[in-house]
Structures are given as structure tokens and as C-alpha cells.
Image: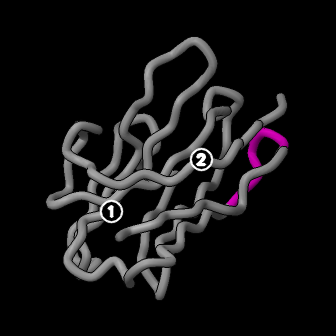
Amino acid sequence: QVQLAEAGGGLVQAGGSVTLSCVDSGHSFRGYAMGWFRQAPGKEREFVSGISWTGTSTNYADSVKGRFTIYVKNALYLQMNSLRPEDTAVYYCAAGAVISVDQKDYKYWGQGTQVTVSS
């Protein structure tokens, strides 16, 4: 059973940086593609970034491309730089069979961690 848990959220000023982490207490992500999604207040959950289980393939939403970096190193990480107030959301990590922008393709989800960017 894959059990995901995010950490690293908090309050940060615009232009600042935060790194989120996601650990799997059940396995070591082996064989799963991993993704980060976010949900802002009053909005639907949206894809942020995805990575293959080997770490060799990545994908980013246009809104975060060049500012966020996803990587795997014993855990899943999302390094977020040049943060903007519109990045404020609950961030979720997820595991699935393939990298996908569709949340329906991810079987396992963490509980989420709040990131708030102040202007």
C-alpha cells in the first residue's frame, strides 16, 4: 500500500522559495510515476508537475515552467522559486502508472500541504 505524506508548506513572501517533499511510508515510489497537483481556494485541483519513477522524464504546467523543479532523491520534491501570490494553494503529491496531467490517472494521494505566498 502506497501511503504518501507531504511536508514543507508554509507562508512565504512573493519572490521567495519553498521546497516541498513527499515521502511514501509504504514503498519507495518504485514503478510509479509521481506528480504534484495544487488546489487554490474556489478552484479545481490542477496539475503542477510530474516525474517518471526513474526521474528521467518530467513535465510542468506552463504556469510554473522555469520556476519549479521536480526531482526524486529518496523522496519526491518540488522546489518552488520566484513564488507568486497566485501560487497560493494546497499542494498534493500523487502516484500513478504514468506521468499525466489528469488527476484521474493517479491512484494514490497525500493529504496536502498549504503554501501561502504573500504579496
Q: Callout 1 environment at 10 Å: few (<14), some (14 to 19), or many (20+)?
A: many
Structure colour scheme: one colour
* Residue 41 image point, x, y percent: 63, 18
Asked whether residue 14 is drawn in magenta, I would say yes
Residue 14 circle label: none
The residue tagged 1 is 34
Residue that mark 2 sits on: 112
Check the picture and name the quadrant holding the C terminus.
top right
Q: Is residue 109 rendered to the left or right of residue 58?
A: right
Amino acid type, label 2:
Gly
Q: Is residue 82 above or below residue 43?
A: below
Magenta highlight range: 13-18
Q: Earlier in the sequence, mark 1 or mark 2?
A: 1
Residue with the most extreme top position: 42
Residue at (20% x, 77% y) in the render? 31
Residue type at numbered disc 1? Met
Judge whether 114 appears above or below 67 on screen: above
Residue at x-position 57% and y-position 48%: 111
Q: Is residue 56 left or right of residue 35?
A: left
Q: Secondary structure at mark 2?
A: loop
Q: Is residue 93 magenta?
A: no
